[in-house]
Amino acid sequence: MIKAKYIDIFQNLETPFYFYDLELLRHTLQTVKEESSKYGYVVHYAIKANASDAILDTIAEYGMGADCVSGNEVARAIEKGINKEKVAFAGVGKTDKEIKTALENEIFSFNCESIPEIEVINEIAGKMGKVAPIAIRINPDVDPQTHEYITTGLKDNKFGINHWDFDEVGRVLKSLPNIRLTGIHFHVGSQITDISVFEQLSLKVNKIHEWFEQNGFHLEHINVGGGLGINYDSPKEEPVSDFKAYFKAFNDNLELKEGQQLHFELGRSLVAQCGHLISKVLYVKQGLETKFLILDAGMTELIRPALYKANHDITNLTSAASPVKYDVVGPICESSDTFGKGILLPESKRGDLIAMHSAGAYGESMASTYNMRDLVKSYSSDQLDQM
Ligand SMILES: *Cc1c(COP(=O)(O)O)cnc(C)c1O
């Protein structure tokens, strides 16, 4: 999965670090471009998944838009050459400063999550002599069949506006002069591997869309968010998610009116498989019953196992000895700093290189300096090719 020439270079680099395989990223982005353009769909990259230079530069090369959840992300997307007319700004708690940044940059759309937020955007836009294009984030009450912490579209959730508030929202929208409703927005969760969830979402969207039409709101776009999952168990067998089936599910089920555009905000499915966290074995420690493989990478570099009980495929890049079972752990002073229990790996020793795969999304972007550790570094395959 990782080419031998890169593993040779890894031996001389200080660990831990992220390695991004830009060849796989380009192949993934090319697939997305081909499958989405069959239907004229617009794809935004959800920057929070990974905002490192190599990743954003590559995303920008493919002409994608951006989905941002902070003012800094908005600024960074534009600085990286992403067209501001393809920048959407979401989030339940936008600050006044962030709203101003986005208004100054004349972005594509504010994805609004509550009535008080719409009123504040109206007020700030008014003071700046602008009209803010907004989409309402709606809670469609679709169960994404995924981990509860990454479920966002059920009715008892901090995200979005619920259907029982529509009448009130309609009244508010009609009374505010400095906002313009351009679309409706949905995002039901993350790591969704069951395509029927997107079929259900499409059918809900049709009904909700109808309400807006009947109440005199003509929508220019519908944004169905992101959430397409990846294969964490067998990344080698499935390095690219099934984008063909994904976009087809919407094309077959979601009804667009003449001239309306369908937008997507994909994060994980674009960047997860191209990223690997590379670490070294510090110590092999014999416990009472288990053998611990203690790495120099921990939850400060990759928090997903500690935060979501997530599983990453783990391999030893430098040993081909017969397999032994290990509990693979990090050096941080927390019991949850564990990458996997009872993992079969070739017998490993101090200094071996260990890779955690499928770590390109919500890995480096969630890194911290807890325990006063250095913030994790990253290298792209393009960078290593020049070494
Ligand atoms: C996080 C997020 C996304 C991206 O989700 P993925 O599961 O990474 O595809 C899209 N839209 C919004 C509003 C988000 O918060």
Image: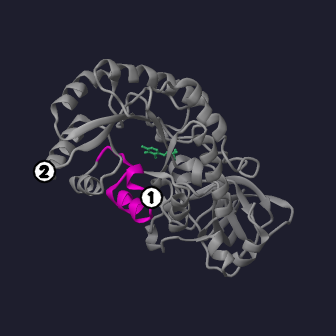
Quadrant of the rendered structure where residue 197 is?
top right
**Magenta stretch containing residue 305, yes or no?**
no
Sequence-wise, the earlier of marks 2 and 1 is 1
Name the spot of residue 329 as percent of width and height, x first: 62, 61
Note whether 369 is above or below 230 in the view shown: below
Q: What residue do we see at 50% from left, 67% from top? A: 53
What mark, if any, has residue 127 been given in the picture? 2
Give the residue at the far left of this rendering. 127
Name the spot of residue 151 as percent of width and height, x first: 47, 37
Note whether 56 is above or below 233 in the view shown: below
Name the spot of residue 84 as percent of width and height, x first: 38, 55
Magenta segment: 69-93
254 horizontally vs 324: left or right? left
Residue 299 shows in this picture = no
Name the residue that disc number 1 marks: 82
Q: What residue do we see at 67% from left, 53% from top? A: 341
Name the spot of residue 373 as percent of width and height, x first: 48, 73
